[in-house]
Image (tube, grey):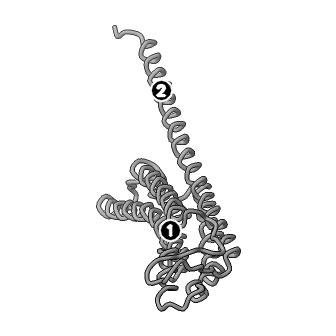
Amino acid sequence: MDWKFLQGLLSGVNKYSTAFGRIWLSVVFVFRVLVFVVAAERVWSDDQGHFDCNTRQPGCTNICYDYYFPVSHIRLWALQLIFVTCPSFMVVLHVAYREERERKYRAKHGDDTRLYDNPGQKHGGLWWTYLMSLFIKTIFEITFLYFLHYIYDSFKLPRKVQCDVSPCPNLVDCYIARPTEKTIFTYFMVGASVLCVILNICEIFYLIASRVVNLKHRGTVHTSSRKVHSDTDCCKSPLT
């Protein structure tokens, strides 16, 4: 998979993100994508080949491996990274839509006119798009963590598993290659995912709090302006 292409696309999201969003993007690429590409893929590259069972029954080893590893950790993490980064493209597409509207508006009314003060500023619909992308990313993260724990019943890989699935002749013992190393990487990837969830939740609260403060400030300014106009009208002397 060409992760550089994904990095190039997400780089455009960085300039529209808050401080929490920039930290999230750094964590995704440094602690997840980079670790995934450089180390994790190599750790699981020989997983099935070194899954050894104490039987020579044809097909038993393959069936037991499929039984205990229905979805590879690597493929599950690859899907997780794709799903949690795709919602960020909603923001880029919304900004591109605003920029196109801005271009058409200027072409129609002149270059001195403006439809938006800043197409990338998180106001109006773009604010809702950004907030929705955070909720979707958080849901995807939690869902994949649940699936990983549900499929393997734990984040820790055992050294030995027992299998009696057909065509195995009886209860056989199977041994996982490098279980300690794989467990360490699993906990690391899960910890990075949890950190991303925390950052997303912090950013959600930050966006909502900023919006509330701005609305309250606008309401105060509007009320003060109306009061000034009212006092001015009251002080005017009647016409004679």
User: Which residue is found at the position 48% from the left and 92% from the top?
Assistant: 58
Q: Give the residue at x 47% y 82%.
A: 63
Can see residue 24? yes
Q: Residue furthest left?
A: 108
Instruction: State whether residue 8 appears in this view.
Output: no
Q: Quadrant of residue 186?
A: bottom right
Q: Position of residue 78 (x, y in %)?
A: 51, 74
Question: Tag 2's secondary structure?
Answer: helix
Of residues 100 and 176, the one drawn nearer to the viewer in this rendering: 176
Residue 158 lies, in percent from the top left, at 64, 71
User: Tag 1 or tag 2, which sits nearer the N-term?
Assistant: 1
Which amino acid type is shown beneath numbered disc 1?
A: Gln
Front-lying residue, 174 or 40: 174
The picture places residue 41, in percent across and down from the top left corner, at 60, 81
Residue 41 marker? none
Rounded to the nearest angstrom, the CA distance separating label 2 from label 1 is 51 Å
Residue at x 40%, y 60% (from the top left corner): 94
Residue 154, quarter of the rendered image:
bottom right
Q: Which mark is residue 225?
A: 2
Q: Which residue is mark 1?
A: 80
Q: Secondary structure at mark 1?
A: helix
Tag 1: Cα neighbours inside 10 Å, few (<14), some, or many (≥20)?
Answer: some
> Going 48% across and 83% down the picture, which residue do you hit?
168
Contact? badges 2 and 1 (CB < 8 Å): no
Q: Is residue 128 left or right of residue 217?
A: left
